[in-house]
Image (cartoon, coloured by chain):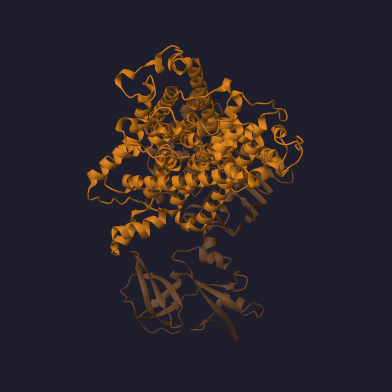
Amino acid sequence: MPEIRLRDVKKGFGKTIAVDDVSLDVRNRDFLALLGPSGCGKTTTLRMIAGLEEPDKGEIYFGDRTVFSSEKGVSLPASERRIGLVFQTYALWPHMNCFENIAFPMKVKKVPEQEIKAKVKELMDLLHLYGLEDRYPSELSGGQQQRVSLARALTTDPEILLLDEPLSNLDAKLRVEMRSEIKRIHHLIGCTCVYVTHDQSEALSMSGTIAIMNEGRIVQVGTPTEIYDDPNSVFVASFIGAPSTNLLCASISRQNDEVCVDFGFGKLAVKGNARKILSDPTVPSEVVFGIRPEDIIISEKEVTGAFQGDVYSFLYLGRNQIVEVNLPSGNLIRAMIPVESLKIGQSVQIVFKDNFHVFDRKSGNAIV
Amino acid sequence: MRFQAALRKTHVVLSLLFLTVLTYLVLVPVFNLVHETVVWGEEDTRLTSEAQVGQISLFHWWRILTSSISSNMFYTPLLNSLIVGFGTSILSLVIGFVLAWLAVRTDVPFKGPLSDMAMIPFALPSWAFALAWITLFKNERIGGYMGMFPALSGIQVPDWIAYGALPIIVCLSLHYFTLNYNLISSALSTMDAQMEEAAEIAGASRAYILRRIVFPVITPAILSSFILTFTHSVSSFGGPFFLGTPVRYYVMSTMVFSAFNNRMYGDAYTLALILMGLVLFALYLNRKVIGTRKSFVTVGGTGFRSKVTRLKRRSTIGAAAITFILVITVLPLVVLLLQTLMRYLGIYSIDNLTLHFWIGASDPALADGQPGVVMNAGILNAAKNSLSLAFLTALITSFVGLLIGYAIVKGRGTRISGVLDSVAYAPAVIPSITFGALYLSMFARPFGPIPPLYGTFTLLVIACSVKTLPTASRAGVSCMMQIGKELEEAAIMAGASWLRRFRAIILPLTRKGFLSSFTLTFMSVMRELTLIVMLVTTSTNLLTNIAVRYAEQDYMQHSDAVVLILSAITLVVVLVARRTTSEKIAGE
């Protein structure tokens, strides 16, 4: 099973650049999620790996095989890349039943009839599609269609499995079920997986590695924990996490030994490692301060160093609730806290925990 | 490298292929026609000694636009064409709108049969109505026999009812309202009822809603069908030929034909070119007006449901609508049938009835010895020709249309796809009579590697295929859009070759679209007159043009019988197609 390497891959459609000099390594047997907002170029990247779209320039390697190289003039057709692809719309052929849909790739390759039958049965069992051979796609539920589409992608024992937002057309409950199903299949088959999604919780929960894309570029690659804990830019911080991170414009004030983040409506004294970094006067002082809602404490009593605000709204989530607090400055702060009874308009104190990020306001890059 | 990469894609190869073929069959003939109008022709030597065959000259243009005959030859026919065009567009819009509104938006009874029957007039040639009209209302003006109505009732029919603008407009409208019906009913049925409900909740009356909500929203559909009807009727030939020519009421198309018959080819080409300019101008206006209103077209959204208006006298109105359609479809055919049974024209009595014109052998006393239909080799041969032409054309056009649709959709966003889209649509904006003129001027002589095709069956097949291509390629595009690109890509991933994908995926999934495109083309070629009237010769006679030839010689029974046969064939095809595809035959 190969690793996938992309080198300076570029692709434009007319005047717009869809994918801009992307280089990416996907480790052997890894499950990599290409995550990004719509239009960021993630699907185009996937289609170029699949061979459905030809890059304008760059190289793509599967292990030691060159599947595309603009310089060497190599462009392997999709069918020779030994990959499976699951489409967002499933792309099941409506005039063929389940069996025929799954068998088609093998029929094209002229696999003997007996082998086809055995393989289809094996895959249908693997994906819990017992007894659906004669059904047509229109007679299947969304989840079943998804499984058939997955089975079809696996018929030729692909070394690489590509999935293009495979769960986005399913309802919420099925989506969560299929997540573990896809993970299980990946584990059983042991192929290298590239999974395109715009759903961060899908990426966080399923993948071994996440590559975040924005405006045609890859902005951060890392494990889900790395991405969640150490976003390297304002964009990643704002994109990852639900409810989304609080981002506040602030400036750094350095007086004597003390380093403070000044929000305008109040100041936060910085301690520990962050203080060490921020005390360096060459570090820009115009910053964006980011803190996750779960790192905020809300208290009804006076706390030193807390900011005063009043409850703007709250959303009950079961164990937790999301509270929005309106500060006198007009800033709205989101906090995720254990359920306690609050009233809209009630005056509360908010406290920022030490777990926060500071970004350069100009470049958007992380400082702390 | 990039060019070579592009050539590996099947849709690019297809696009290039069709562009080349269509350039040769559409664009080159247009330039050729323009050229023919500005050089001296062979025939001009009869008119003036100045003529030097093949030399550049604006002779035809001066003759048409500024000479002593321009009033008769150009300005009057132009005015008449405009009157017929506008009149027909308005009348068919009114009929089409009322019927569409009844069928889609009201609780009128017999909705199903109503919308089925509203399509029947579309299957009949537009001039079948004209032929029936003249049979019914013919008066003494042009001599010969009397029409059924004046003869039986004793009431003199005034000229303005019997001939000219009014009957032409009425007869054309009885055919073309189906276009309006189709476009408007589909616009009405996709219009979200919530828009009307919102207005109703706001307290608006039904008339107010119709005026302020429904009309504006379907305005693009109304305008489109108006312009479409205009472009067809302003250049239509059959109706004006039967109802106008006998009293020297000429429109542009009949004038082109008359010039052609008099071998004034340069004049015919010039008139045909002007007519094309007129149609292009109308389409340009349409584009400009609709362009600003395009936002309305994207009507719909989630889960729309048609709003049904309760009619106060629903049974009366329903009966009236059904009666109207029955009268306009059945009456003309009955009138024509009756006339075929009359031994001598104009004598309306039982003992004048005969089956001679259907089954009789040659009798020198009747129609100069023309045998009845079933004994008539000429008619049988024409029927064979018509059927082969319609079948071949339908096969070629729907297949090529599908491939063009494929090439356009696959190449979406690229320049070549856009160019192919426009070029494949070009034949639609060329009036049929002009299109005939194009091919006449182009293929009367050898052109490049192609021998002179004038007078051959091949030329008819080519002309009809190219002229019907726009509808077929539009249908092809919408078929391909419905399939979506992922279904084919899934087969690419499976390693299927292009041919395999086409056979196993695309063809089966577009079968319905292919069939309806086939039927539509078959039907329109079957009843096509305007396009082929200048292209047929005695060896390639078709049913439509021998109907005209018989009428010219006053063998009305033969002419009527041929029209009846023609109508029967198209009706059967349409009914069978509706049964098998259960899909609406869309308008042209």
Q: Colour of chain A?
A: brown
- State whether residue B281 appears in this view: yes
Give the number of marks: 0
Rendered view: B531 above or below B63: above
Residue at point 62% right, 73% down? A362
Question: Left or right: B172 with respect to A276?
Answer: left
Q: Quadrant of the N terminus of chain B?
A: top right
Residue plotted at (48% across, 52% down): A206
The image shows residue A182 at horizontal and vertical percentages of: 46, 46
Percent x, y for residue B83? 48, 47
Please identify the quarter of the rendering in which residue B571 is found: top left
Query: Closest to the observer: A3 or B480?
Result: B480
Q: Is residue A88 visible?
A: no
According to the colouring, which chain is orange?
B
Closer to us: A161 or A80: A80
Q: What residue is shown at x 60% (from left), y 70% (from top)?
A: A364
Quarter-wise, where is residue A271 in the image? bottom right
